[in-house]
Amino acid sequence: MSATEAAAIGLTHGSSEDTGLGHRGPESKSIVVPYGFWLFVLSDIVLFSALFATYAALSHATDGGPTSNELFDRTLVAVETLALLVSSFICGLAMIAAKRRNMAWTQIWLLVTGLLGAVFLAIELYEFGHMIHIGAGPQRSAFLSSFFTLVGCHGAHVTAGLLWIGTMMAQVWAKGFRPEIVRRLLCLSIFWHALDIIWVAIFTIVYLIGTLP
Amino acid sequence: MLGKLTWHAIPFDQPIPLITSLIVILIIGAIGIWVWRKGWWPYLWNEYITSTDHKRIGIMYIVLALVMLVRGFADALMMRAQQSLAIGASQGYLPPEHYDQIFSAHGTIMIFFMAMPFIIGLMNFVVPLQLGVRDVAFPTMNNVSFWLTASGALLVNLSLFIGEFSRTGWLAFPPLSEKAFSPGVGVDYYLVALQISGVGTVLTAVNFVTTILKVRAPGMSYMRMPVFTWTSLAANLLILAAFPVLTATYAMLMLDRYLGFHFFTNNGGGNSMLYMNLIWVWGHPEVYILALPSFGIFSEVVSTFSGKPLFGYRSMVYATLAICIISFMVWLHHFFTMGAGADVNALFGIASMIIAVPTGVKIFNWLFTMYGGRVRFTVPMYYAIGFMLTFVIGGLTGVLLAMPPVDFIVHNSLFLVAHFHNVIIGAVVFGVMAGYTYWFPKALGFTLDERLGKMIFWCWFIGFYLAWFPEYALGFMGATRRLQHIADPSWKPYLDVAMIGALVILAGIVLTVVQLLYSIKTRDRRLDLTGDPWDGRTLEWLTLSPPPHFNFAVLPDVHGEEAYWTRKLTAIREEKLIEEPKYEDIEMPVNTPTGVICAFFASLTGFAVIWYIWWLAILGLIGAFAVLVWYAWRDEHEHIIPAAEVAELERERRRVRAELLKTLTAPA
């Protein structure tokens, strides 16, 4: 397979002819930095996989307390999911604006991304608060411990993402579209999309399977 | 205001930790003042503490590892002494609660703060040089990783003076490590310190996987990479996939302890065997995170000192990757007695035995590399041969333990403890000592004293057999691990031999310090002026010793395996060096105090969390975030080394190389 064919089907980076065999020497930063960040995201996904495994092992250990069927509300989760998925789409728009060096739209789309993330977080906090209020807090049973930890860890990532979005908005504003700042925006979008991937898994494994009749 | 922290945290009533910590504080203070009097602080700050140079960071890792080796070994000596003394009517000199802290600290420190920093330090120093590049992919993050590791080490050692350390063994198994049974700060010290250093380790893995896969000299394709680089890649892939599980597991135990969750508790539906599964999903790959780079070191050493290319290079690479993958499929052999059933145990038993196959491939490759070679019996080669002898025995006892019926009899016994010390000392300690001796001249420009080096080897080698073979026997006789008191007096002779073995190893460690000081003092006799003291084969021997900041004036163009050896032979055949290239300006990353300041805030937060000082914890987190934002705001990323300066340094290298070539091509 030639390098161009490989690039065409996405095996290699489009603009690079390097097939990993190292003929060209060190890669440029625009490849090295997102690559490294991807590896970090993968390690983060491994962390979540440990939490998923724990949830799977403990999801029936309710200790006589409430079960998933009694607690989860599909409608609320649907709204939550919609907010997060749309925010990922908007994040994509922000990246397109950044690619065109359009300051106003980059800022607006980043802001909307963050706001939708905040909506997601608010719903999650409401859900957590409600559960704790009715006596279904994380101390109640192993099932609830693993639920709060898995979903809460995702929520903590979203919070970190919001902090990052805010920082990037300030940085783009102050420094403009310098190469290293564009690279950071790219990493931010990788992170934000990865949170979507995790959420889809949480949505399926925790909420959909958890509310099966 | 200060959470749980009161004056009672200082062990005024326990003379051993109190006096030890006072002595350590005095020594640290004295060294600090001595460095200040000599006027070395600015140098240390600029050239080491804030350095983003992978070579300097590597050296800092190794210094940390050597210091922690002394600390961890002091614990080992105390345990051996206690077991020799506390037999029959005697209770020895260590009360149980103190003895428990010592074995916990010994394991924790030796694995996380001795072996890991030593291996990562060697990787840091060697991998970019072997790849023929100027630095790792993320030099600043590399510095941050080191300081986070150091922060963890600091917290573990702080527990000696303020509070207590964990009494729950090196992996803090619940339910013993839960709040109900370990209410003190010991387990918290353990968890928080390892969480902080674990973040550093994951960042290291991101850095090295990216470096090895994306930052290589032109022509350095995968099947041309030296085996140490290959094993480093495998180890870092393992870190990337295993350490996040450790982070998650410790986070869950922390939630249990701090917020009353029920992951591993006896009540509330918690399941402590879940912890066993999770921790060993990390724990078994961890063995190979340490062992694989050691195998890489031996590959370099055996090939160099046999004067031959490594036998079966490709099979070595495949064996490395096979171990890398299979190491994730054997975790259950750490708790066959859980009762998962015969089928599950058989599966994991067989998987564990299968790992011996690629490992055996490696052993034969090293033997065949030596076969027919002109072997030079230098210190690293001593370690390599000592390793092959010792590690095979450790591997065989491992295969024994992999059989569930045998494991049911000897699990949790001294047989097991002897087995893992056999492989860890035999592979990892011998490996890092070989690597330390082998690459020392590259790092500092002069070799270590050979005669003392051989004495150190014999101390480790003989000391190991004396210390651990009696324990194999004791294990068969029914001695369980972690005994603070020995009830059966007939075990005393075995324990005394073990004590003598520990003292022989102590002599080796003392000699290591002597060797270092003596070698520095008499360095003029053993200067490495050529940059290639061992007649090496890989690219690190192409540059000067110590290498210039930028490693290579021009990135080497790699043709074939054994990049440097090929180039050397060509030069000898043609009786001239390669054409002088055109020099260009080199951009190198600037130094930054980000890492050390971040680690300062991490230590502060960690300490605050251990002692429930919540305002300080929040303050520390805000501080760390502020530093990162401040760093992200920088405008100057790189400093330029002008072409003229590069040319000057490189011409000096070419001059010594031309002289070396003259001696090599002179008619005999």
Image (cartoon, rainbow, N blue to C red):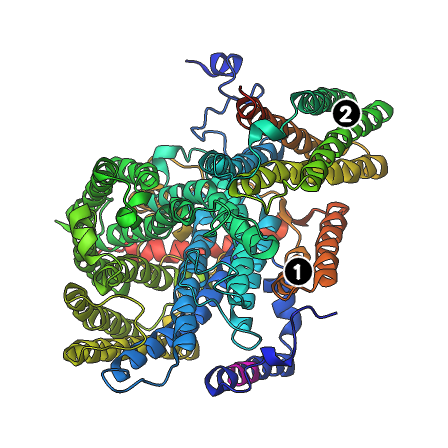
Quarter of image, res B664: bottom left
Is residue B389 visible in the rendered image? The answer is yes
Q: Chain of mark 1?
A: B
Task: Say if the magenta span includes residue B547.
Answer: no
Question: Which residue is depicted at the point 37% across and 39% down?
Answer: B225
Q: Quadrant of the image for the N terminus of chain A?
A: top left
- Front one among A136 and B616: A136
- Front one among B289 and B179: B179
Depicted B521 relative to depicted A66: above or below: below
What is the magenta range? B21-26
Q: Which residue is under mark 1? A: B605
Question: Which residue is depicted at the point 61% across and 35% down?
Answer: A151
Depicted B414 relative to depicted B323: above or below: below
- Front one among A167 and B328: B328
Depicted B260 relative to depicted A47: above or below: below
Q: Residue furthest front?
A: A64
Please determine if labels 1 and 2 lie on a single subunit: no
Left of B101 or right of it: where is B352? left
Left of B176 or right of it: where is A117? right
- In terms of secondary structure, what is the magenta stretch mainly? helix
Label annotation for residue B364: none
Residue B356 point in image, percent of width and height: 20, 44
Q: Chain of mark 2?
A: A
Q: Which residue is under mark 2? A: A98
Q: Could you say whether the residue bearing mark 1 is in a helix, strand or loop? A: helix
Residue B463 point in image, percent of width and height: 23, 73
Callout 2: 10 Å neighbours few (<14), some, many (20+)? many
Depicted A188 relative to depicted B199: above or below: above
Left of B593 or right of it: where is B461? left
